[in-house]
Image (cartoon, helix red, strand yellow):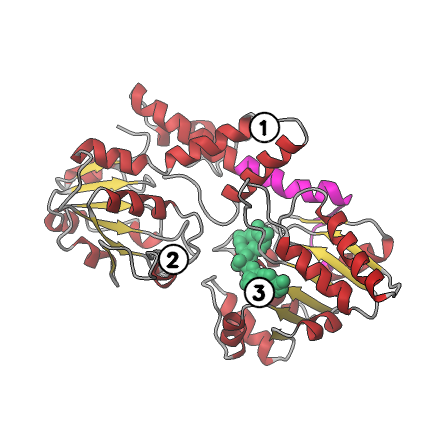
Amino acid sequence: MKVTVIGTGYVGLVTGACLAEMGNHVLCLDVDQRKIDILNSGGIPIHEPGLQEVVRRNAAAGRLEFTTDIAHSVAHGTLQFIAVGTPPDEDGSADLQYVLAAARNIGRLMTDYKVVIDKSTVPVGTADKVKAAIAEELAARGVDLEYSVASNPEFLKEGAAVNDFMRPDRVVVGVEDERAVLLLKALYQPFTRNRERLLVMDVRSAEFTKYAANAMLATRISFMNELSRLAERLGADIELVRVGIGSDPRIGTSFLYAGAGYGGSCFPKDVKALVRTSAETGLPAVLLNAVEQVNDEQKLVLVDKLVKRYGENLNGKTFALWGLAFKPNTDDMREAPSRVLIAELLKRGASVKAYDPVATEEAKRVLVDAEGNTLAGLSFVEAANDALEGANGLVIVTEWKEFRSPDFDTLAATLKDKIVFDGRNLYEPALVRASGLEYHSIGRQ
Ligand code: NAI
């Protein structure tokens, strides 16, 4: 099939590459010339395990192409996926300007039947807006062409995106007409053939499913973070409690980890958008507001522990920071808890030496002052142990595998104050303390 993917970011590029892998002829469009240039010269603009190989293989076979030419992209695909960003507006609602701009381009330039598929995470009712935007453009041209609008939210996880797309738990398709159903079933059949995983539903339910899924996951995290605070006061260990409740199949083990708060491009903005949607319908969200509040506070949990230990004034102190990305296996820095931590430490006069296995370049791009210079007091190093040199203590924010088994004796010998603040509960407290280190973690004594 001929497929166009509009927006070549984390979702669009993975979608395009994986659809090409199944033999489709895919054209990826982006307005960002830099990204398209990188892709056309054989690179990829993001870090995502396994993606580079899929992109290279399919580009070499001529099945995967990249362009900034909107007319070419509209002409190419019968299926037009919209996978552009939907960042939060000032009031927390999803900003649909990029989605609707993409829809208008299609309406302005299409000359034959198209299925327009919202893959971006968009509020319930967006498909109607997309439909109306295309209708307006067609009316302005005085032409009458058939088209379908479908919702196909994406559930991939950054860091495991290729695998998630190739072997989905489920593919949700919200669609109104039989012609589009048939095309989407055919497109996804190779990904879902071993077990029926294609869930066809009405458009509004499909749009809502994505928010419901992310809100549920965010709720589990905030729930455990709230319990972790209580555990500290009660003298309990949240890690033992986690295993204790997770072994109940009704609860399950995933997304029960207390930590330094959730971040990324999805949970924070999707929870906000759902809160906003609820308010608009006259049913203010009670639970979700609390989920968000707990998370905002949790991003400060490490700062609170540092301040409790050292006092408000951190002048002259240096902290090694392990982990910048919002989670392991990605270079995505959007809403990363490390950003809040770094800002708070610098504000109190501390210096920060930061290390991340892959997100350093992205961090250098986003952690800048108004003039575009790296924030004063912040520096980046090339190896985890380099961050320890001259540091008073170590702060761990992202649970990269390479941080899981450090040499605690080296930490004790290098860190001036022999102190570790672990925002992800990576270690057995007794083991860390056996090396003479002071160890602060989340929800444990
Ligand atoms: P992203 O920011 O990485 O990529 C979006 C891309 O769209 C950018 O490269 C941008 O230049 C491009 N763009 C914007 N307007 C355009 C236009 N009119 N024409 C062509 N390109 C345009 O965003 P990401 O992370 O891929 O997210 C996209 C959507 O998917 C969002 O709604 C997000 O909530 C959703 N999503 C994201 C997931 C993730 O893990 N990142 C997972 C599931 C859904």
Is 403 drawn above or below residue 433 in the view shown?
A: below
Q: Which residue lies under the disc numbered 1?
A: 285
Q: Which residue lies under the disc numbered 2?
A: 366
In the image, 380: left or right of 155?
A: left
Which residue is at a point 53% across and 38% down the rendered structure image? 217
Measured in 3D between alpha carbons, the distance from the residue under mark 3 to the one under mark 2, in whole angstroms, is 20 Å
Dot label at residue 196:
none
Q: Nearer the viewer, mark 3 or mark 2?
A: 2
User: For mark 1, does the 10 Å Cα neighbourhood hold few (<14), some (14 to 19), or many (20 or more) residues?
Assistant: some
Query: Foreground: 419 or 85?
Result: 85
Measured in 3D between alpha carbons, the distance from the residue under mark 3 to the one under mark 1, in whole angstroms, is 33 Å
Give the extent of the magenta segment: 188-217
Which residue is at a point 51% across and 33% down the rendered structure image? 219
Measured in 3D between alpha carbons, the distance from the residue under mark 1 to the one under mark 2, in whole angstroms, is 32 Å
Please tell me which of labels 3 and 1 falls first in the chain: 3
In the image, 394: left or right of 179?
A: left
Can residue 205 be seen here? The reply is yes
User: For mark 2, does the 10 Å Cα neighbourhood hold few (<14), some (14 to 19), or many (20 or more) residues?
Assistant: some
Q: Is mark 3 within 8 Å of ligand 1?
A: yes
